Every structure is written in C-alpha cells, then in structure tokens.
Amino acid sequence: MKYFGSGHGACPGCGLPIAVKNVLEAIGPCFVANSTGCLEIISSQYGKSAWGVPYIHSLFENAAAVAAGIEAALKALGRTDEGPVVVFAGDGATADIGIGPLSGMFDRGHDVLYICLDNEAYQNTGNQQSGLTPTGSNTTTCPAGKLMPGKPGPKKDMVAIALAHKVPYVATASVAYPKDIRRKAKRAMEFEGPKYIQIHSTCVTGWGIEGKLAIPIARLAVETGLYPLVEYENGKLVRVRKIKKRKPVEEYLKPQKRFRHLFKHPKGHEIIEEIQRIADENAARFGLDVE
Amino acid sequence: MMKVVRGFYSVAYSVKLCKPNVICAYPITPQTEIVERLAEMYANGELGDCEYITAESEFGSASILVGASAAGARTFTATCSQGLILMSEVLWNAAGMRLPIVIVNANRSLSAPLSIWNDHQDSMAMRDAGIIQVYVENNQEVHDMIPQAFKVAEDRRVMLPFMVCMDGYKLTHAYEPVDLLSQELVDSFLPPYDPPVKLTTKDPLTFGSYATPATYMEFRAAMHNAMERARKVMDEVFKEWAEVSGRNWGGHIANSGEGAEVYVIAMGSLVGLVRDVVDELRKDGKSVDLIKLRTFRPFPADELRKALSGASKVIVFERSLSLGSEPPVTLDVKSAIQKLDIDVYSLVVGLGGRDVPRDLVKKSIEEVIDGKVEPGMHFRGLKDYEEVIV
C-alpha cells in the first residue's frame, strides 16, 4: 500500500489502518490532516512515518481548521490539481474537544473530506469516555461501579450535527465493510464542500476483545442495528444497509469486556433493555429491517 | 505617499502590499478594525489571489494558518489579549513546526478584571513560545515593520512566527501622518515566499511528527538556534530597510549613543513621551538618555550591555507583571547587565490602560536621578486601595 505503509504500530485487530487504507485507496493522492490520537501515535513517529501522502499532525482539537487552511492555501496558490484534503480524527477529537473548529469548517463550506474514526472512547490514552461512547460502556472515566453502570446518557449524534450544518454528503461506515468504505469515500468526492463520514472502528484493548474477533464484532454492531450504515446526500437519506433477521443486542455486547458488567450489575438488565430500545429505534428510523 | 490614517489602516495597507496568500482572523477589540480593513480590501478584489477567512475563533484562526503555512502560503493574522491567549496552544505548535506566520498583536491587558485597554501583558505571556517579538513606537513604524517581519520570518536561517506588537487604541485608533509604501518598493524588498519544505503530493512529507526522548530535545535546540540566528538576520533586514525606505528605526535597540549616567528603557507607544521628557531633562543638564527596546525576542542582551556599560542607574518602564517575581523586561535587562555595577529601577506603569501622564514620567525619572527611590520594583500611578479579602 503506497499511501499508508507497513510499519505503523497499530495493535492486531485495530480498525484504524483498515479505515485509513480503504479511504486513501479510494481517493488517491491527497493531503492528510490528523488530530492527536491513536492514528497519529501509531503512524507519525519522527523518522518512522507510515504516510505516503503529505501529512500534518497539529493538535488534538484543530485538524478540521488545519485542513481548511491547507484547502485555502491550495486555492490561493492555484494548486487545486494536487489532490483533495482529508481529515482523519478520532471520536473525542471530533465530537468533544474539536467540535468548535469542525463546526467552523462545516459552516464555511471548505472542500474537505472529514473522516471520524469512531472507536467510541479516548482509546489512545486507555479508554476514557468521549461524547461518542455508547450507553452503558465501561470506561476508565465512567467506570461501572456500585452506583453507576457505565456511561450514562446516549451516544452523541454527530451525523445529525453534520446534517444541521447542511453538509452535502454525510455517511456512516464500518471497518467490517471495507468495500462500503471505499464506495462512500469515492462518492463523497463527487460533492463540493465539506463531507463527513463516521467510520465505526474496532479497538481491541478498549473494547476488551481478541484481535481475531474484531471484524465479526464490528459486523455485529451493524447487524444488531446499533451502528446503522446510512448515507445522506444534500440532507436526504439516500441509502441504508438493510438487515436480514436483526440480531438482539446481547450478541454484540456479550463478547466485549467493556459491556460485560451489564450482565451482572443490578441495573444491567435495565441498561441492556435501553440499548435494545436504541437499536429498535434506529431500525424504525432508518427502515433497517428487511420486510 | 504621505496620508493621515489610523493605525489599523497603516497595518492593513502594509499587509496588502506584502501579497499574503491566506489571511485569517477573528475580530477582537481593539484589533478588529485591522481585519475589517483587510476584509474590505478582499471584498473589493484588492487582495489579488489571497484567501481571506473569518474563523470561528482565534483558536481556529491560528489553526487555519498552520495548515495554510505548512502548505506553502504566506500567512497573516492579527489579534490581541484573550484572543492571543486563545491562540497560544496553536502558536507554540506553529513555532515548533517552524511556520513563519506573521501576527500583529494590538497589545491589550488580560482578564480578570476585564479590560479592553492597553498594556503588554498579552504578548509577554507568549515570551517562551519561540515567536519573534518586536514593539513599535508609532504607526509609521508598524507600517514599515510588516514587510520586514515577513522577510525575517521567512528567511531560511530563521523560519519562526513573527509578532509585531503595537499598543491597542494608543496606536491602532490614533490618526497619524504615515508615508504609505509603494507596491514597487515592497516588491523589490520582499521576494515571494519560497518555503524550503511544504505539504505537496508531489513530494509527500510528514509535518508535526511526534518525537520520543531520543529526538525531541534536538528540535527544541534547533528552535533556540534559529532564534539566535534571527538576531543577525534582523540586523541585515533592518539595515536594508533603512537603505530602501530612507527611514532608520534602529536595530534591536535604538538610543542616541551620546552616553549618560541614567538610562530609561521603554517600549511601544510610551517611547515618544519618554524621549520628549528625556530631551527636556538633558536640556536641564541631567545626564539621562533613552533606550528604545525594539526587540523583546530574541532579547538584545549584548546591545544593552554595551549601551549601558557607562551607566550607574537604569529605569525600566514596565507595562506588564510576572506575579510573584519581577516584571519580564526587568528580568531580562538584569540578566544582560548582571556583571555591571548598575542599579535597576523597575517602574510599573499604565496597566489596563491607566494613563501615563508626562508629569508622572518626569517625576519618576527625577526621583531616580535624585536618589529618592530605592532600586527594585515600584508601581507608579497606583491609587490607594484596600484588599477586601485580607
């Protein structure tokens, strides 16, 4: 792979290289801005860069703004033929600390593809809660204890936030479906202006799973309706990945250490019911179930 | 072309002549009208191929310029006070990535209490970021300083951000006659930006790597060396500017060179008033002279040591504090002259826009000359007040 080389330091089973390689393969030479996080740490060590494209890591919370600056410079310098500008940012960098610059980038309509690598917590520093951590998940900053059964409240709806900014192309994807990632990245490039794709990406250490189970578990997130794969063009829902015989959420939760407490905790049953309700709601909202 | 203009216009017009590729800013008092004038020029198509971006915050503004500068663009922003502090995380990063972003800081005090008026606390808080800092005396000097700032910052021996500091309101909003530069002169002085490295798909490079303990220290040492090299580059550029423009603002410091027993060090818009007072005192037979401190980073320790070698007392008019220690300029002055037998008087004036009247300046200098005040730090122009918490 010429754009994201071997030699990166990701854990076996990590979803990030799958997401990155497939996006880059789909769109070709491009400019990458990357926020601080797992991806940056596994790929950008001085003297050992894994990147075959021009790459900049600046700060945790400003990749969207840095990308906007690259885009503006290329326009001003008449170098728009060199390739598109892409952001790779984690869920915390996207939904929490970096949401201001991201909103600014969306709002000003920069021609930038923003990829949120959603592994559902601050995994680089050891699984701390982010705005995209799902309900009930056990993290080190919302640990399952006597009183609290893991992450309270829902996962932040970044797709709706992107849509509210009138972002012309908004989609979700999963590392369990690489062909779908490539198609969506390619499709995104047909739109001018900001584009947002949120890719559900496995984290073996944070989720507490074995590497070999990463892809089957990522697939279960889709098959239970918890991570619906959807696609919006100009604000309209245009495509949805349908599910034949949607699976109960327990099948997704059980093999992961981050949800294991739900099967023992006195409030666990209630939380699992709540998670099932979220999946059912997704199914109804997006018409996930095949009739 | 001599014209009576306000400070912000003298900045904006000079920036335009430097042909930046990307300008990005967020409005903040009293800097706002600098970027308003640039936005107006952009709206009227006067900025050429330049991209002008109104950011969602100063944090965003600095971040956009990091991307633009890394991609090879000549970049400019203006800010002040809370805005500069909001930018600070990014500006440390820009300096570390060796991006020659030019910033005009319309010096303003910091909260709390909220104050929109002038002192130097904001830029002093950025002392250690790896940003060159020059303080200007008037609106002609700031007009002249912008092309020089780009030339120094973009020099391959330097490659560091450059901050031109002008006193908020006192200069930004003041009407002054300014000899506006011509495009021909600026073009002949300032070549287009040709970065040694940039983000391009034709030669992919990694910017902003992370460094292990095996490499980090070398990057920081390289920044320090660049700041040291900047001294010489600034000498060259200042000299060249005097030749092409016919206006000599001095080097890192400016003084009469006539020698005196007592020296007064001042920065920014206070310089004009102090010069006037010092001239009057000299006419009265007092042995006193002014040192205008133009460069704060890199700090001109050698020049100061030389200029002060025959002095017995030095007064530093300070416009900022380092709470729990001595004010920042005083500390550097003391460090520069540590082996000389000179008493240092650190007189803190004009915080948060407090007026610094001529009488106060004169009386403060006379008290030192007459030996009525002990060396050390003193507030001047401070009213009696009561600390209610104690």
Image: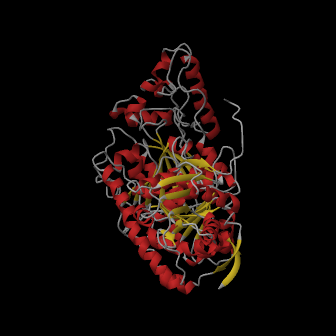
Task: Pick the residue in front: B360 or A112.
Answer: B360
> Is residue B195 left or right of B273 when viewed as pictured?
left
**A262 versus B385 height, above or below:** above
| Picture quadrant of residue A274 | top right
Is there any visible trace of residue A112 in the rendered image?
A: no
Position in image of residue A209 (x %, y %): 38, 29
Residue B30 percent across, percent down from the top left:
68, 60
Quarter of the view holding residue B130: bottom left
> How far across and down, in percent of the image, does residue A265 sit?
51, 15
- Looking at the rendered image, the quarter that the N terminus of chain B falls into is bottom right
Q: Nearer the viewer, residue B390 or B73?
A: B390
**At x 48% / y 25%, what residue is drawn?**
A138
The answer to whether residue A264 of the structure is visible from this angle is: yes
Query: Which x, y percent locates residue B340?
Result: 40, 57
Q: Is residue A38 left or right of residue B183?
A: left
Q: Nearer the viewer, residue A145 or A28?
A: A145
* Residue drawn at (54%, 66%) of the image: B287
Q: With respect to residue A199, does A135 lie above or below?
A: above
